[in-house]
Amino acid sequence: MAAVAAMVSFSLPTFITGLEVSQGLSAIDAVWALVWGSVIILIIGAVMGAIGANSRMSSYLLVRVAFGDLGASLVNIAFAISLLGWFGININLFAGAVSRLALEVWGQNLPTIGLAIFASICMTITTIVGFKAINLLATLLVPVLAFVTFLLARSAFETHTLDEIMAVEKTATLTIGDGISAIVGAIIIGAIILPDITRFVRHWSGAVYAAIIAYMIVQLVVMAAASLAGSVSGKTDILDIMLDLNLGLGAFAIVIAGSWVLNSLNLYSTVLSIKATFPGLSSRWLAIGLGAVGVIAALLNILDSFVTFLFYLSVIFIPVAGVIIIDWALIRPAAYTIDTLENNRPINVPGFIAWAIGAMFAVLASEMLLPTLTGIAAMDAVILAGIVYTILAWRNRIEVSS
């Protein structure tokens, strides 16, 4: 299970995020951004993961408990659209990267359409087999990607010392808050849906350990390795950097292995979200149908104009974590069992109001139309949703307790 969480951090988007943050900040500021961004993700992931481990429920069943059956239908369908959209976008990213690497490394011109279809089939089959297949795949591939990451970091020190790298002068285009926001924004959805993985662990402490390994060790090392290599090369494209360092095969490993596990998890979580709303549907046929929709959308290139929509859809999910955490910790801790779903409430109005306020703030802050308290819009949205929900639902908790 820890291997699956770690594999998400070994994915190409994590390398890209680390590189982008390092390019926009001075070396010391980039270090602070990487550390604090990872700490924030760790806190949210550890708490959400522990809730999943304690309740034995996926994130989508937790949404049903927190928001009610009717309310959760809206939230979970939106989750499914977002995850399926990112599945298609990652297929595009995978096909383009593999096609380019094959041309650069072997001189072979591989068609992106064929690569996209082949990748989608492999990822869909992995999802159909289930979490055990994803876990096995991750366990086999983690050592490979760890070695590639080590080679990437070592390459930076072959020509420069750490002091020289830290002394590289760059024009800062970001603030530390911007850097932290970029890291949190790129990773936080994975932290919120961590219960999809941690519900299988025997004790909640296992979920915390998994979050520490994924977010404070692997993620931090991966982003740091990309930052170091980028600082030395001066280039802004992770594939260009790896090709310049004669790590073409390593780039293949990161793109293929990372995308395979990450997208299998995306499809797996999409199936879980639909099943939480429509439990009578077949998981196998859902995976096949959703995988087909994702790859067709990728092949038709309709996802390019969909990216902005998906970004905002992802942003408005973030306050969901605030509502779930407060509901579990303070308002209705005893409700977080599978038995609650047999006689669940239709809608949690205070939860929806808190989510709406948090989501509205997240969107406006992302557009810089509102100031942020912490400088990190995503974190402010989670905190705001939690505070609003506590105020609105506290009376119900007192009544239940008495």
Image (cartoon, rainbow, N blue to C red):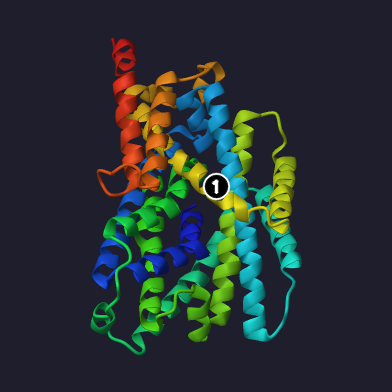
From what the image shows, is residue 151 above or below residue 338? below
Tell me which corner region of the image, top left, top right, bottom left or bottom right, holds residue 372: top left
Residue 222: in sight, yes or no? no
Near-viewer residue (250 or 354): 354
Residue at left 74%, top 47%?
288
Tell me which corner region of the image, top left, top right, bottom left or bottom right, holds residue 401: top left
- Taking the image as shown, residue 103 lies to the left or right of residue 136, namely right
From what the image shows, is residue 223 above or below residue 327? below
Residue at left 45%, top 67%?
15
Count of numbered circles in the view: 1
How would you rate the neighbour count of disc 1 (Cα within 10 Å): few for under 14, some for 14-19, many for 20 or more? Answer: some
From what the image shows, is residue 320 above or below residue 287? above
Residue at left 55%, top 39%?
79
Tell me which corner region of the image, top left, top right, bottom left or bottom right, holds residue 335: top left
Residue 302 on image: x %, y %: 67, 53
User: In the picture, which quadrant includes the C terminus?
Assistant: top left
Element carrying mark 1:
helix
Residue 394 on image: x %, y %: 30, 19
Residue 231: in sight, yes or no? yes
From what the image shows, is residue 186 above or below residue 218? above
Residue at left 52%, top 72%?
144
Near-viewer residue (258 or 369): 369
Residue 11 on image: x %, y %: 51, 63
Reading the image, the residue beneath label 1 is 310
Q: Amino acid at mark 1?
A: Leu
